[in-house]
Image: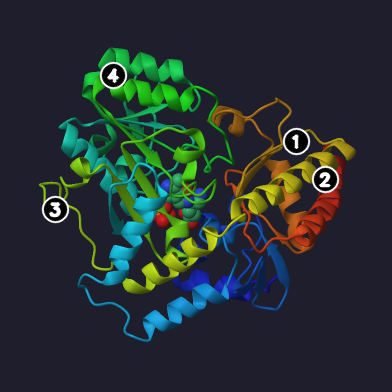
């Protein structure tokens, strides 16, 4: 593996040696791999080893690394200057594109991260409804804004408690935690205090506890509760937007949220976030309306260029069919290998994203199911694949990501390498 001196040097000046905790390999152990270059479906570490990449920078790199069209558009844009702090035509082009592609968008505001987008969408929902309470789901992640760093309080509590030091209890007292795929629980909350609830925020496919699909009726129940009580339904599509289909999860499932949160893919790998919805809601934002929101680099031209080039590529005929075929073959191959090596295992896919679970308990449908999975087996599996040049997410609580650059060759190599990895897991469990 990569010489640890790279990580030692990083740790001297960067907390934990990383600028985002999940990169630190805390969940799988070992020393993080320092990557130097990416091309197509591959990453290359600082010592020249290659890896088939199933992290894709946590979602943005859906057309693969260093795609020529994306690089070209970035180069042409940046050659004209980097950022002006004024309106720029590419911002209008991006807003127009997003509203064409995402069914529920009439207006959209660009920001610089998914965190910022989710935080702003919640502020807007609270401002528009003049209500404070929000509902989120255990295992769903919407960035690290204070109001969302919350975990379920003890039994009788109807509000969350901070999940991180530095978050005042008062900041999360209006945030409730429900269980994913538990429509009855949400209905009960609404029947008791629906008139106090500003919004539900949900990952329409949960990608921050592996990959957990909504069961039939779950998203519909959220939509129904919000309609009955005048609350807003916020789909956090930072991960699923343009990942699970051209119009995201809302198009895939035919559910129209009131607000949508986006990020990752729309920046093509550069810092980005966006939130949008009906014009009547979005026009409550400054400078038109009273809900304040701002950002120095929001909508900057270079990010817009990278995002637009990426959105052009995913708009090509057959893009999602090919991505979905690839995911299906990968998941099927992993299931077959797990069976062949007598390892109890589940795998799910949703076109460009997938989840793998070392579970003996059947389908994984909520956070508690994910917590019951064998994290130690995932750790072993991860490292045995890493040694064979396959780079999975360094945490069993993350989803995996494919790109249009992954071909049958990468899938075959991965499935073959998984055989060795499953064998190691079985031996460890004997
Ligand atoms: P960012 O602030 O990291 O751009 O986006 C936050 C966010 C919001 N909503 C969803 C559904 C997300 O998945 C994310 C961020 N995803 C994680 C990966 N699980 C980012 C990786 C990291 O934290 O380094």
The quarter of the displayed image where residue 130 is located: top left
Q: Earlier along the polypeptide chain: callout 2 or callout 3? A: 3
Foreground: disc 3 or disc 1: 3
Q: Secondary structure at mark 4?
A: helix
Q: CA distance from mark 1 to mark 4?
A: 40 Å
Q: In the rendered image, which residue does mark 3 sit on? A: 286
Q: In the rendered image, which residue does mark 2 sit on? A: 422
Q: Secondary structure at mark 1?
A: loop
The picture places residue 242, in percent across and down from the top left corner, at 49, 51
Q: CA distance from mark 2 to mark 1?
A: 10 Å
Work out whether 57 lies above or below 418: below
Foreground: disc 2 or disc 4: 4
Foreground: disc 2 or disc 3: 3
Q: Any atom of ligand 1 within 8 Å of the CB at mark 2?
A: no
Q: In the rendered image, which residue does mark 4 sit on? A: 228
Residue at point 85% right, 49% down?
Answer: 419
The picture places residue 51, in percent across and down from the top left corner, at 71, 66
The quarter of the displayed image where residue 186 is located: top left
- Label 4 near label 1: C-beta < 8 Å? no
Q: In the rendered image, which residue does mark 1 sit on? A: 345
Q: Earlier along the polypeptide chain: callout 2 or callout 1? A: 1
Foreground: disc 1 or disc 4: 4
Residue at point 32% right, 80% down?
Answer: 82
Q: Secondary structure at mark 2?
A: helix
């Amino acid at each position: 593996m990569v010489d640890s001196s790279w990580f030692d040097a990083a740790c001297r000046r960067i907390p934990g040696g990383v600028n985002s905790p999940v990169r630190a390999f805390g969940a799988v152990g070992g020393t993080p791999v320092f990557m130097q270059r990416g091309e197509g479906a591959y990453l290359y570490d600082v010592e020249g080893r290659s890896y088939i990449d199933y992290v894709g920078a946590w979602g943005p790199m859906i057309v693969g690394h260093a795609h020529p069209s994306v690089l070209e558009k970035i180069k042409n844009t940046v050659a004209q200057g980097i950022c002006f702090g004024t309106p720029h035509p590419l911002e209008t082009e991006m807003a127009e594109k997003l509203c064409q592609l995402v069914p529920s968008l009439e207006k959209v505001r660009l920001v610089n991260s998914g965190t910022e987008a989710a935080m702003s969408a919640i502020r807007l929902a609270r401002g528009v409804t003049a209500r404070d309470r929000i509902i989120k789901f255990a295992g769903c992640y919407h960035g690290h804004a204070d109001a969302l760093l919350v975990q379920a309080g003890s039994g009788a509590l109807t509000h969350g408690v901070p999940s991180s030091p530095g978050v005042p209890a008062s900041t999360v007292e209006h945030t409730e935690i429900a269980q994913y795929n538990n429509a009855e629980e949400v209905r009960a909350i609404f029947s008791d205090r629906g008139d106090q609830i500003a919004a539900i925020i949900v990952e329409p496919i949960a990608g921050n506890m592996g990959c957990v699909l909504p069961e039939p009726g779950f998203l519909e129940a959220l939509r129904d509760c919000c309609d009955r009580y005048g609350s807003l339904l916020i789909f956090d599509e930072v991960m699923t937007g343009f990942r699970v289909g051209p119009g995201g999860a809302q198009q895939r499932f035919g559910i129209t949220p009131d607000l949508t949160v986006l990020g990752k893919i729309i920046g093509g790998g550069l810092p980005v976030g966006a939130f949008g919805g009906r014009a009547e809601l979005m026009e409550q934002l400054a400078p038109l309306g009273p809900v304040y929101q701002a950002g120095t680099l929001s909508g900057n031209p270079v990010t817009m260029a990278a995002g637009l080039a990426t959105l052009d590529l995913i708009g090509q005929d057959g893009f999602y069919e090919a991505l979905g075929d690839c995911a299906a073959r990968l998941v099927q191959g992993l299931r077959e290998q797990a069976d062949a090596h007598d390892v109890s295992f589940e795998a799910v896919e949703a076109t460009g994203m997938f989840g793998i679970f070392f579970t003996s308990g059947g389908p994984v449908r909520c956070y508690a199911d994910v917590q019951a999975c064998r994290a130690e087996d995932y750790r072993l599996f991860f490292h045995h694949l890493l040694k064979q040049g396959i780079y999975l997410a360094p945490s069993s609580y993350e989803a995996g990501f494919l790109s249009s650059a992954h071909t049958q060759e990468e899938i075959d190599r991965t499935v073959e390498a998984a055989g060795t990895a499953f064998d190691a897991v079985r031996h460890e469990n004997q």
